[in-house]
Structure formats: structure tokens, C-alpha cells
Image (cartoon, rainbow, N blue to C red):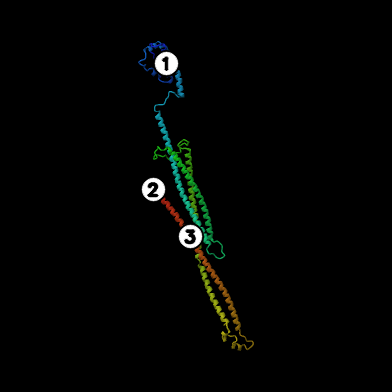
Amino acid sequence: MQLQSVPVGSGSFGPPSWRERTVQSIRRAEHLVRQTGAGLSAACRRPLSAGFPQRLMQEASTDKIRAVKCAESRDSICSKKQTRARTAAVTKGSPAMFPPPGLRERCTAASSAMASRYMREVREVEAQLQRQAGRVTEEVTKLQGERGHLERALRGLRTDLAVNRRSREARSKRPAPVNTQEKDGADSLLLWERKELTELKLDLEEVLGNTRTQLQALGESSRRLLACASERAQVLELLPRSGSAGLHGATDHMQTLPNSSFTPKCKQVLESSSLAVQQSQLLRQRIRQTLSSATSRQNAAHLSVNDSLLQKVAEADGVQSLALTRAATRQAVSRKQREIKSIIYSRGRVQGPEYNSDTLTREKLNRPLVQVYQRHAAMRLPEAAHIAQGSAALTRCLTSCEGELAALQGACLQLLGDLHSQRAAAQVDQTILHMRRQQADRRDMSSFSSRGRAESKALTIGGATRE
């Protein structure tokens, strides 16, 4: 807007010095108006006050022409200075710019918007932390279930080791043949089963130790996540908890700054918890594979030993040939005893009575007929020689039969001892086999009941969730 000089009225009032000072004040005010960039022309067109002295206007009319000329010269100079001042104001920022009347409301609205945006971002971060904590808790629950399976498998292995020890002790006390210290196939299989179960026990104990370490890591990760979520939730008191909590991966687009909604500590906690969850999933897969392999190896060793013991029991039950041989031996002993009795009777008959008075006349070697026959010198009867030879032969037969009888009786006793040993060993093996089968049935029932409890618990949780 073009600045115009204020016309000064004619007339004189007061001393001339006052008039000059008044004119100078007016010029100085015009100069200041030009410098401040205000609308001087509008200010100059404002009417004077009603009480302005007419004399001052009259006195000033004489100097009007001179004042106008001076004003035009000053206007040209001030316009140039004003142009340069405006250019500098555009460059440096115009000092005439001042805040609008609604600055307070605008600042309040901007602050509220900034706080709301920050709170929404913090809510997304807090929701992400809570979801990750939930995943960690779910992983802890699954890993605890796998730990329970490991502990049950270890209890089964310790039970099988105790059964193996009792089986070996029982077989070491069973009656064995004399001078026989050799181990049979069942003993070798028991030793192999003990070695196999010991290796499986060590493997499962190692995996169980890793599982406990991983559970501690998951617990620590869950505590850190909940601590960060609690720290982030300190600014969420004014936001509705039932509102939108953000989508999965909402923190991917956020910048990680110390004073932002997504701090480096939150990012580190999320990354460490994700890594712990991945490690736990791999560990659970390894646990399932280890349990599957251990169960198959354990069952294979158990069945191998049971089959061997069953074969031993079947071999002990199949001692009919031994019993038949013993029966035949006993019959031979009886026959030999009857034969010895016959030989003893025959030898007694051949030798005759023990006392001479009991001998009959017809049995004597000096009976009258023999005496009459032997009156000739060359005539001798072979009766005495034949009786002596027959008695010696019967004595030899009796000695031989007695030796054979003793051998048969010894063989019969040996067969009887072997038969008793076989039956006792078969009884021991059968007792061991029954014990092993009973323990295996209990182990299967315990695993079945544990699976049943787990299934019923899952059904209960599912029903509660549906409700």
C-alpha cells in the first residue's frame, strides 16, 4: 500500500517551535510506519480528532508546499529502504509475522495428535509383545509335555534296568550242571540288553538336561517380554483395551530408536524370544525322534530277551526224551538186579550148602557110586572140576553184573539230577519271563493312562474354550 503524507491544516496556534516539533513528530511516525510495513496510507486517511486546533492547521498551510517536497524526497528514499527491508524480510523471515489467535488450540491439537499416534504405536508394540509372550507360553506348555514323556521314558528304562538286574541275579542262582560255568544265549542277551538300556538312558538324560535348560531360557524370555510389555503399557491407560491391537508384524515398519515407541530393547527381546521358540521347536522334534528310536530299541531288546527265555523254557519243557531215557535206565537197573539175584541163586545152588551136614548123600563127591567107580586108577569123574568152573563163571558174571548195575544206577541218578535241574531252571526262566511280561504290561498301562489323562485334559480345555 502506497504511503501518503498527511495534509497539515493552515492556522497558527502556539509558538512556532511547537509547530515544528509537531511536524517532526508526524514525519517520524510516518517513517516508522513505513519501516514496520504497516498500512500507512490507511492510517494517514484516518480523520483527525474534533478538538484538533484550527490554528495549527493554518500555520502549517504555509509550509505545505515545502513539506510536500521534502516528503516526496523522503518517500523515494524510504521506498527504496522499504523494498530492501522487505527483500531481507523474505530472506530472513519477516519480523512482522506473528502467531495467529488460535495458536494455543493448534498446539493443543498437534500435541494430542502426536500423543495419540505414539500411544497407538505403543499399543501395537505392546500387543506384539503380548502375542509373543503367549507363543512363548504355549511353547513352554508343549515342551513341558515333551519333558513329561522323557521322564516317563526314563522311568521305564530304569525299571527295565532293574528287571534286567533281577533277571541276571535269578539266572545266576538257578541250578546248573556240575562243573559248568559257561553262559548260555539268554545270559548273553541279558548282558546286551543291559548295555543297550544304559546307552538309551544316557541319551535320554542328555536330552532331558537340554530340555530343562531350554525351559529356563523360555521362562526368562517370557519374563522379559512381559516386563517390556508392562513398561510399554504405562502410557496406555487412556486407550480402550478392547480396541484394535494391531496386526501381526505391525512392528516391521517401525523405526528402532531409543525414544520411539519401538525401542531397541523391545526389538532385542522379540528377536531373542523368536530364536528361543525356534530352538524349542527343533528340540521338541529331536525329543520325538529320540523317544521313537529309544522306544523301538527298548522294545526290540525286551522282546529278544523274552524270546530267548521262552525258548529256554520250551527246551526245559521238552525233556521227555530225558525222562524216557531215565525210565529205560531204571528198567535196565531192575533187569540187572533180577539177573544178579538169579546169578547169586545159581552160584549158591552150584556151590551147595554151607555146612557139610546139610549136604545130601547123593550130592557128596564121595558117595558110594563114585567110590566104586574110582576103584580103577584111571577112572576119574569130572564132576568136581565142572562144579568149580561153574562156580568161578558165576562169580565172574556176578562181579560183572554188579559193576553194570552200579553204572546203571549212577546213570539213572545223573539223569534224575539233570531232569530236576532242567525243571528248576525252566521254573526260574518261567518266573523271570512272567516278571518281565508283568513289568512290560504295567509300563504299557501307565503310558496308556498318561495318554488318556492328556487326552481328557485336552478335551476339558477345548470344552472350556468353546464355552
Question: Tag on residue 25?
Answer: 1
Tell whether 375 sits left or right of 430.
right
Q: Are marks 1 and 2 in contact (CB under 8 Å)?
A: no
Between 120 and 285, which is closer to the camera in this rendering? 120
Dot 1 amino acid type: Ser
N-terminal label among 1 and 2: 1
* Figure check: 109 above or below 344: above
Q: Earlier in the sequence, mark 3 or mark 1?
A: 1
Q: Is residue 83 visible?
A: yes
If the image is split into quadrants, where does the N terminus sit? Answer: top left
Q: How many marks?
A: 3
- Which residue appears at 47% of the width and 51% of the height? 149
State the residue at coordinates (59%, 82%).
387
The Cα atoms of the two marked residues, 3 and 1, are separated by 127 Å
Q: Secondary structure at mark 2?
A: helix
Q: Is residue 443 above or below residue 89?
A: below
Please, is residue 301 above or below residue 389 in the view?
Answer: above
Q: Left or right of 62: which side holds 331?
A: right
Of the image marks 2 and 3, the number of the one nearer the N terminus: 3
| Within-10-Å neighbours for mark 1: few <14, some 14–19, many 20+ | few
**Closer to the camera in the image, 461 or 86:** 461
Q: Are marks 2 and 3 in contact (CB under 8 Å)?
A: no
What is the spatial separation of the Cα atoms under label 2 and label 3, in whole angstroms? 43 Å
**Residue type indicated by callout 3:** Met
Task: Examine the image and state in which quarter residue 137 appears.
Answer: top left
Residue placed under numbered mark 2 in the picture: 464
Q: Secondary structure at mark 1?
A: helix
Residue 163 position within the rendered picture, expressed as x and y whole percent measured from the top left: 50, 58
Report, in whole angstroms, how far the alpha carbon at label 1 lies from the one at label 2: 92 Å
Name the residue that disc number 3 marks: 435
